Each structure stands twice: as structure tokens, then as C-alpha cells.
Image (spheres, helix red, strand yellow):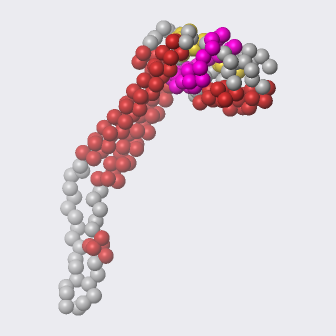
Amino acid sequence: MKFLISIPCQLIVVILVAVTISSVVSKPLQPLTSALSVSNSEDQPAATVQPEAIAPFDFRPIFIALFAALGTFFLWHAYRFYRSESAIAQAQHVGARVSTANGLTGVMRYLFSDVKINLADKRISKRTMASLQQIHNLTSLNVSNCGLDQKMLFQFEYCRFLEEIDVRENPLSREALLAFRKKISAKLLHSC
């Protein structure tokens, strides 16, 4: 649900970038020669600068930049949705229990729901463990007794919505847990 709050902010930034880029691109550059022309001879008449006629504003560059920015925004989220759903499917393949508060799946889960993954007592590969950080809106992760090592643990610092992580019964040193605790704001459940 936290992601839904950030969408308007992301769209505002996209629109501001599009308008800024279009205003820079739409202004024609004056030829360098006319800007630097100076008459040195007395025989030639001095060049006079004619004021430019006010032309109606052309909105096409703004619309083009806006459509390009919005297209990029939607393609980026489609890509993130695909990565998130692939990671969830990979976790379910190894026996993870995936749950959401309201039972949503697919795009609705990506937009509106917090995801909880329970992999307790499952032996999973490093690749599957690394893919868990791709899950969008992951708020709770239970990887207790999964053979989690320090390198795998520090991959979870990139889960930006993570609120709770259970790492009990894994061969992790106290120093590793303290270092990880400093990097995240989530509640860390551990056995040390």
C-alpha cells in the first residue's frame, strides 16, 4: 500500500522532467553567425536586427516529451511487475507460503497489497534467495532455518518496504546481525 502513495509523486516528477526537456528542445538555436556578425568595413551597411514576430506557442514538443515520459514510467512498472511475479512464482515453486492481507494476486497485488513470504525450514538455493528482493511490496519475510549465510542476508537490505524479517536458526554471527540491523529499519527476529 505504501507504493500507491508514491505513484503521484513519481508522476509529478515525470511530468516536470517532460516539460523541462520539451522547453529546452523546442527553442530553436540561433545561428552562431548572426549572433557574432559585426561589420568592420565602412562600405557595408550595418546589419539591423529585426524583432521576431510573436508566434503562437507550439505544444507538440511538450506532448511528445510527456507521452515519452509516461510511456517510460509505465514500461518501467511493467518490468518491475514481471520481476516481482517471477520471484513470487520461484518462491512458491520451492514451497513458500505467499500471503496478502486481502488475498489479491497479479497486478492488484502489485498495486494494492503487502506481501508476506514464509520460507521457514525450507532449503532453497542462493538464486531463489536472491530473487526474493525483487518482490514488490514485500513487508514480512520468514527465512528461519533456511541455511541463510551473511552474504544472502545482506541482499535483503534492498527490500525497501520490509517491516519484519525472521532469521532465527541460521548460522549468522552476532557481528553480521548487528551490521545488518544498522542497514535496515525492519524488525529483525533472530536467535542470538
Residue 170 visible to the viewer: yes
- Tell which of 54 and 125 is nearer to you: 125
Residue 192 at x, y percent in the picture? 80, 19
Q: Is residue 171 left or right of residue 111?
A: right
Question: In percent of the image, x 46 and y 19: which residue is there?
Answer: 85
Q: Residue 105: horizontal and vertical position, in percent?
A: 44, 12
Residue 53 as seen in the image, left or right of residue 24: left
Q: Tell whether position 125 is magenta.
A: yes
Q: Which residue is painted at 30% across and 44% down in the image?
A: 62
Which segment did they paint magenta? 120-145
Q: Quadrant of residue 124?
A: top right
Q: Quadrant of residue 59?
A: top left
The reply to whether residue 185 is visible in this rendering is no
Q: Examine the rendered structure and indicate whether residue 96 appears above or below residue 188.
A: above
Establish if 42 lies above or below 128.
Answer: below
Q: Position of residue 95 (x, y in %)?
A: 56, 9
Q: Nearer the viewer, residue 156 or 39?
A: 156
* Residue 150 screen position, x and y as percent: 70, 27
Q: Is residue 183 magenta?
A: no
Q: Give me the residue at 56% from left, 24% from top.
A: 127
Depth check, front residue: 30 or 110: 110
Question: What count of labels does the image hold?
Answer: 0
Asked whether 119 or 51 is in front, the reply is 119
Farthest bottom residue? 42
Q: Is residue 39 above or below residue 152?
A: below
Q: Residue 190 falls in which quadrant of the image?
A: top right
Q: Residue at x 27, y 47 (%)?
A: 61
